[in-house]
Amino acid sequence: MAEEPRKSLNFIEEIIEKDNRTGKWGGMVYTRFPPEPNGYLHIGHAKSICLNFGLAAQYGGKCNLRFDDTNPVKEEEEYVNSIIEDVKWLGFTWDALCFGSDYFDQMYEWALELIKNGHAYVDDQTAEQIREGRGTLTRPGTNSPFRDRLAEENLNLFERMKNGEFPDGSKVLRAKIDMASPNLNLRDPVMYRILHASHHRSGNKWCVYPMYDWAHGNEDSIEGITHSICTLEFENHRSLYDWFLDKLGVHHPQQIEFARLELTYTVMSKRRLLELVKEGGVRGWDDPRMPTLSGMRRRGYTPEAIRAFCKEIGAAKFNSTIDIAKLENSIRTDLNKRAERRMAVLNPLRVVITNYPENEDELLEAINNPEDESAGTRKVPFSRELFIEREDFMEDPPKKFFRLAPGREVRLRYAYFITCEEVIKDDTGKVIELRCTYDPATRGGDSPDGRKVKGTLHWVSAKHAVNAEVRQYDHLFMKENPSDVEEGQDYKSNLNPESLVIIENAKLEPGLKAAQRGERFQFERMGYFCVDLDSSDTRLVFNRTVTLRDTWAKIHKKGG
């Protein structure tokens, strides 16, 4: 019997498998997802979440959720809670819930150790002086005039910094490494700065706070992490990560960098996302146009679709931008299997079936999901007056338009063949009503005499229709690269003014009246939609998650 081909490994899996073969970590894989609680998680974080938790699960290891909360000025409990909710929603469970702030005492003690050993010093220079003294890629840095302070003086000053004797910005603690290093990160980086600010967990206990490069390795070491997986922007920081841990002589994880996720038609910078929220470019962190996980959840994305997307794009060593169509295809594939079908008319045009009995209606059987037999069927009411999509009728249709037109016969989904006999217009010439006839012998949508029609339309009984607000979402930005702007403009100049189109009175089949918040459906021929958080018993609100592929729309755009 032939062996099955072995699944190809990504470069991180190759590292882990080599470590396991050599017994480097005793066969243990211990990872962590370490967000800073200064904003909401986005789809880029989902890639890191899936990677870290996924690798731990794949190799029978552990993964921590750790909050890198070392900057009290930007961090809030709101963000902590949202991150916990998002990670749970994605389907992951951590082995330990950790906070960098829980290690402040240990980090402080380790800083004292570096000072005693001559590897750190207190610098009185301003931030601007330190920046100037660091040099450039072509010019080495210059030593601080305070670099050669004795250890005893540095210990005294650092303790006084901790005790709150000095104002913000007046002193910092720096590592003493090499001001001529070709790696600028090794030119005496700042380890601690003075910040008289209340911390969301430790309150006012501290007024010196560790910088990320100092805290990062310490946190990994304390938790016993084996593989510290970071995005590529930290590659040049790896030497510093290693230097700190080597000087301390403590547990030393391996830092591995992978390419972060960039998507077309969106921005991933938390700073920019925060600007959009604060300046009203969107309605909040959970606006369905946002790439945040809370926004995607509200839009109707499933955790399964996001996990599948992250698995498809995988882990790479080099940065690239992923077409957002890949993400949209992942939710289409997932919802095609799980979402029940319903009929909804977003831009209604009234149809009167003149030969259908007045004051009568009937129930027709409709399939809930052709991809899932267990979903069964439902009954939808049919009556003399219906609504169809206005776009499904043209008075003078071009070739390849197979929908309703004067004198043309089409099929109504699950119902009958109808023929357009008369077009009613208002005083402005706008079509306001179609008068049609139906063939009673075609109940269920098939003709007993075998005649064929090319068009099948969805519809809603006017008598039974439920009104709803439908929010049609599109790309937040008009350009694939929102940062592609003319001189004097910024990325916000590329915001798409039609990223949200609100339809006030869509007509839905009556069964949707009972739909619950978060419930997802395919509106036949229109796309996938979910019930928004704003929805109530008296006002239904649906969000469009993603469109269906529409061949006619493509032809129409090309002028066919």
Image (spheres, rainbow, N blue to C red):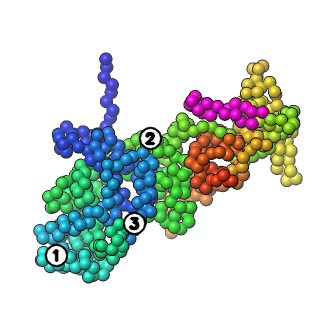
Gap in angstroms between the C-alphas marked 3 and 2: 31 Å
Q: Earlier in the sequence, mark 3 or mark 2?
A: 3
x and y, in percent, of residue 81 in the image? 43, 58
Above/below status of 300 relative to 111: above
Q: Is the residue marked by circle 2 packed among few (<14), some (14-19), or many (20+) residues within 10 Å?
A: some
Q: Quadrant of residue 376?
A: top right
The answer to whether mark 2 and mark 1 are in CB contact below 8 A is no
Tell which of 214 and 146 is nearer to you: 214
- Identify residue type, mark 1: Leu
Residue 460 at least partly seen: yes
Above/below status of 495 relative to 144: above
Q: Secondary structure at mark 2?
A: helix
The answer to whether mark 3 and mark 2 are in CB contact below 8 A is no
Q: Residue at x 53, y 68 (%)?
A: 279
Q: Is residue 368 magenta?
A: yes
Q: Dot 2 corresponds to which residue? A: 308
Above/below status of 276 relative to 314: below
Q: Is the residue marked by circle 3 packed among few (<14), some (14-19), or many (20+) residues within 10 Å?
A: some
Q: Residue at x 65, y 45 (%)?
A: 514
The quadrant of the picture occupied by the C terminus is top right
Q: Residue at x 22, y 64 (%)?
A: 106
x and y, in percent, of residue 311 in the image? 40, 41
Q: Is the residue marked by circle 1 packed among few (<14), some (14-19), or many (20+) residues within 10 Å?
A: many
Tell which of 209 and 429 is nearer to you: 209
Write the start and end of the magenta stretch as one range.
362-381
Check residue 75 in the rendering and tell me which mark sits there, or answer none.
Answer: 3
The answer to whether mark 1 and mark 3 are in CB contact below 8 A is no
Q: Is residue 524 magenta?
A: no
x and y, in percent, of residue 476 in the image? 55, 56
